[in-house]
């Protein structure tokens, strides 16, 4: 995915599953851009909770604390067998709720909106300063291209999870992944319908064209 997602409105489906998880999501627009903090990363350590995290997994120490390490492109995690990702995928899985995301194909950008909303699978890491303070970072997991999704982004497809409290709870467990959840990891699954708008920018989605329909699997 191309560095943008947002939870514009809390859909009834997202509200229901977040309540089942014991969460109260922020009731305002939550926009996420790579290299910036996002305030509603969902993780589980004992209980399920939300936290602020930098959408760029690899950080480095500086005089101002931990900052983005520009040498490593790490807002998306593709090959989960690589050392950068493998430990986190086994033990530190998170998720974010969203109602839209941005993709691109060549020079054309697309805003992909879902009426129900969706969950994106993530991994995260805590970076601990000498004074004990913690900076959290995360990456959105992407999978090999989904045939229909690749019309709008041919390199990869985000890891979409169903809005199902049982599935999401087991995804968040800080333990090796449950076998039945591999279906979402091995091959990208579209868990929601999208209206896809050709746009100039994600921030100002003033498309003059009617949307394309991208239906769930």
Image (cartoon, rainbow, N blue to C red):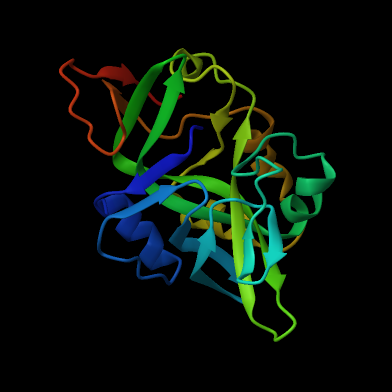
User: Residue 186 at what x, y percent from top left?
Assistant: 69, 31
Q: Residue at x 70, y 86 (%)?
A: 131
Tag count:
0
Residue placed furthest toward the front: 63
In this view, 33 is above or below 169? above
Q: Which residue is drawn at 50% across and 69% down?
A: 51
In this view, 10 is above or below 1? below
Which picture quadrant has residue 196?
A: top left
Depth order, front residue of 18/27: 27
User: Residue 69 at what x, y percent from top left?
Assistant: 67, 51
Q: Is residue 193 left or right of residue 59?
A: left
User: Residue 193 at what x, y percent from top left?
Assistant: 34, 29
Q: Is residue 60 left or right of residue 44?
A: right
Which picture quadrant has residue 81?
A: top right
Q: Residue at x 39, y 58 (%)?
A: 17
Depth order, front residue of 62/196: 62
Depth order, front residue of 144/127: 127
Q: Residue at x 47, y 59 (%)?
A: 37
Q: In this view, does 75 lie to the left or right of 6?
A: right
User: Residue 42 at what x, y percent from top left?
Assistant: 51, 62
In this view, 109 is above or below 162? above
Residue placed furthest toward the bottom: 131
Which picture quadrant has residue 144?
A: top right
């Amino acid at each position: 995915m191309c560095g943008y997602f947002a939870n514009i409105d809390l859909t009834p489906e997202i509200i229901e599953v977040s309540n089942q998880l014991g969460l109260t999501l922020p009731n305002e627009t939550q926009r996420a851009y790579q290299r910036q903090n996002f305030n509603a990363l969902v993780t589980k350590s004992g209980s399920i909770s939300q936290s602020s995290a930098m959408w760029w997994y690899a950080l480095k120490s500086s005089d101002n604390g931990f900052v983005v390490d520009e040498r490593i492109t790490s807002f998306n995690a593709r090959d989960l067998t690589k050392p950068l990702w493998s430990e986190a995928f086994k033990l530190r899985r998170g998720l974010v709720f969203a109602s839209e995301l941005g993709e691109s194909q060549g020079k054309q950008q697309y805003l992909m909106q879902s009426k129900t909303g969706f969950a994106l699978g993530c991994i995260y890491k805590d970076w601990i300063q000498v004074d004990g303070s913690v900076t959290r970072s995360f990456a959105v997991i992407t999978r090999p291209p989904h045939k229909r999704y690749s019309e709008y982004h041919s390199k990869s497809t985000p890891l979409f999870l169903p809005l199902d409290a049982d599935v999401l709870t087991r995804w968040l467990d800080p333990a090796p992944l449950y076998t039945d959840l591999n279906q979402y990891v091995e091959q990208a699954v579209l868990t929601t319908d999208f209206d896809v708008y050709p746009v100039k920018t994600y921030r100002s989605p003033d498309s003059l064209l009617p949307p394309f329909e991208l239906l769930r699997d």
